[in-house]
């Protein structure tokens, strides 16, 4: 097995270290990517875990912090590369996208780019320095403050169907009850995400877990953290990187088509259906939330379910912008979404 080399540094078995890979120099600041490299004592694959390509989704940093803390290198076969802050530029401004007036401000829509925008350079380093040396990948996209996501995305249309099957198995071994089938060949948008790049350029089985969000209180967020750690351990078992067999859910909601219900107006989003109704059924037209004008206190709009479905991502009350995150509802009006066992 060739030795793993990151940022020109040879990584030795049984070591845990942080490697900083330079990206570019912005006005007055160096942009780099810091990766925790956990090199197991035993031979095995390399598993890349990315977090915060979007700069305000910092819940996933907590997942990687806990993972780095608990991994026992004596038991690990292969390497884990954990990048808590993939996009330091957007993190620095607390925003999803990079604030540089570029025409490709979203790092998770900038993979494979030909220009020198910050997002092109950040994703190029991820691509060349990390993805190209990895066998499997997780890229986290969790809720921002005020909303929580709740699904595991897998790639359904790898050119090699065997890789789609591995991606699906990774999603199932995450042991979370909502599985979202992602189409990576659809349009230009999907191809330029981390998943699209991993699937179509590197042939790496990958998943996108979206469990968790911010602003829901320590107890709830701790439970989401535990869900994610269980999911990573399930994946390490499935991939043979640690001993044991993954556990699975009794039933999963396989999401095909879904509605993203978002406010048209900015305002105070006041849920009628909150976290306690997650994974339950809603009827067509059922009231989900109201958006209140922060100056006049009038109801600006009501958010209602577009059809019969199952809620998977939800929100708490918060001040939202037009198009902000509110609800994700799996459409149960056709056969594309359904509850089933593994
Ligand atoms: Zn994201």
Image: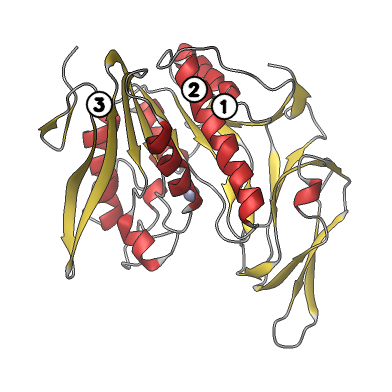
Q: Residue at label 2?
A: 235
Q: In this view, which residue lies farthest toward the bottom?
A: 296
Q: How many marks?
A: 3
Q: Which mark is residue 174?
A: 1
Q: Nearer the viewer, mark 3 or mark 2?
A: 2
Dots 2, 1 in contact, CB < 8 A: yes
User: Which residue is nearer to you in this view: 88 or 308?
Assistant: 88
User: Which residue is nearer to you in this view: 123 or 243?
Assistant: 243
User: Which residue is nearer to you in this view: 332 or 178?
Assistant: 178
Q: Earlier in the sequence, mark 3 or mark 1?
A: 3
- SS for tag 3? helix
| Residue 317 coordinates in the image, percent (x, y) | 71, 66
| Residue 1 coordinates in the image, percent (x, y) | 19, 11
Q: Nearer the viewer, mark 3 or mark 1?
A: 1
- SS for tag 1? loop
Q: Residue at label 3?
A: 133
């Amino acid at each position: 097995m060739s030795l793993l080399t990151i940022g020109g540094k040879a990584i030795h078995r049984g070591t845990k270290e942080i490697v900083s890979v330079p990206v570019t120099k912005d006005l007055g600041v160096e942009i780099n990517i810091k990766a925790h490299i956990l090199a197991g004592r035993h031979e095995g694959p390399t598993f890349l875990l990315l977090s915060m390509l979007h700069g305000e989704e910092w819940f996933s940093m907590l997942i990687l912090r806990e993972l780095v803390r608990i991994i026992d290198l004596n038991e690990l076969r292969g390497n884990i590369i954990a990048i808590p802050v993939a996009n330091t530029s957007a993190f620095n401004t607390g925003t999803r996208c990079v604030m540089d007036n570029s025409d490709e401000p979203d790092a998770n829509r900038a993979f494979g780019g030909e220009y020198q925008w910050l997002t092109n350079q950040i994703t190029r380093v991820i691509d060349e320095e990390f993805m190209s040396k990895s066998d499997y990948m997780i890229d986290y996209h969790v809720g921002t403050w005020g909303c929580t996501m709740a699904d595991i995305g897998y790639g359904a249309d790898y050119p090699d169907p065997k890789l789609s099957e591995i991606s699906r198995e990774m999603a199932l071994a995450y042991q979370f009850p909502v599985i979202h089938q992602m189409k990576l060949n659809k349009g230009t948008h999907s191809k330029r995400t981390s998943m699209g790049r991993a699937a179509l350029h590197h042939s790496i089985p990958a998943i996108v877990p979206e469990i968790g969000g911010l602003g829901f209180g320590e107890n709830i967020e701790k439970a989401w953290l535990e869900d994610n750690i269980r999911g990573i351990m399930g994946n390490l078992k499935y991939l043979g990187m640690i001993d044991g067999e993954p556990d699975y859910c009794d039933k999963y909601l396989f999401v095909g088509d879904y509605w993203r219900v978002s406010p048209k107006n900015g305002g105070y989003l006041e849920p009628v259906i909150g976290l306690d109704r997650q994974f339950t059924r809603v009827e067509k037209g059922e009231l989900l939330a109201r958006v209140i004008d922060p100056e006049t206190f009038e109801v600006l709009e009501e958010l209602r379910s577009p059809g019969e479905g199952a809620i998977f991502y939800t929100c708490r009350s918060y001040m939202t912008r037009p198009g902000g995150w509110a609800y994700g509802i799996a459409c149960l009006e056709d056969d594309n979404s359904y509850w089933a066992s593994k």
